[in-house]
Amino acid sequence: MDTLEKAKDVIDENLDIFEIIFSNIKKAIPNIIIAILFFVIGYFIAKLLRKKIRTMMNIANMDVTLAGFLSQVLFFCVLIVVSIASLSILGIPSSSFIAALGGFGIAVGLALQSNLSNFASGIIIIIFKPFKVGDYIETKDQISGTVRTISIMNTGLDTTDNKKIFIPNSSLTTNYVVNYSKNDIRNIILNIKISYDANHNRAIEILKSILENSKYTIQDADVICEISELSIYYVNILAKTSVKNNNYWDMYYSVMREIKDKFTSEKIEFAHFDTIYKA
């Protein structure tokens, strides 16, 4: 009998605990629903604010890169405030949450030093502007593309074959970056390799004429055409002049086509690497 009574007491105690838990959950359900609704509404408001701020900055002709970065920072700040308010609705004191968040932030910060470095690097990119949205860049690892986004953690590039590449911001501030769009004027440099049997003087005349008469060559720009290398395989002629940055590829393709046509018509032979000329 004693055993049965003890078992009954244990069951009664457990039932009491479950009743208390269920009662507390029942009381908390309205607050839980309100907190969830508050967070969801706050999230969409944060997204709306991000979009509005970016639109307003674009209308004000603010730098596109800065507008995108600041709107993202604002979005996350609003989201943090909404999260704290949602937890307060559940009865969790905001001061306790902030203190816990601070301790948690230190622990996470130590574990995610690289991400903090990316965030700091994003700010450096925004302030010092080694490149901006729309620039064509190349990294130390020979990754190249047009900058489309600069976010708080990474920079997004579109490659020429329409791939999206995301590069951590820290790698762009700790390594060199080639910015092909930074200067208004670029030098177009061609290395044309001809055979030793070809008339190099005539080749130089043709190259100089093509560059001087190109509609893309900047007025009064220097045009240089000279032999720059005598290899056992070829004679290299360096052809160089200046072009506006936005005309670079148009000039490059048109000039290369014209060189091929002119050399073919004048029977100037390009170098063949299967032939070695002996001294």
Image: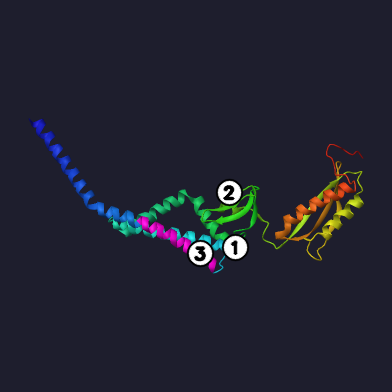
- Return the x and y of residue 178 as percentages of the image width and height: 67, 55
Badge 3 is on which residue? 55
Q: Is residue 129 above or below residue 190?
A: below
Q: Which residues are magenta?
A: 39-59
- Residue 98 in view in this figure: no
Residue at position x 87%, y 54% in the image: 206
Q: Nearer the viewer, mark 3 or mark 1?
A: 3
The secondary structure type at the circle numbered 3 is helix
Tell me, yes or no, if residue 186 can be seen here. yes
Q: Please rate how many residues cluster around mark 1, counting C-alpha atoms within 10 Å: few if below 14, some from 14 to 19, many from 20.
A: few
Residue 86: x and y in percent read: 33, 57
The label on residue 128 is: 1
Measuring from the top left, give residue 257's x and y in whole percent: 80, 50
Q: Is residue 46 magenta?
A: yes
The quarter of the picture where the N terminus appears is top left
Q: CA distance from mark 3 to mark 1?
A: 23 Å
Residue marked by disc 2: 165
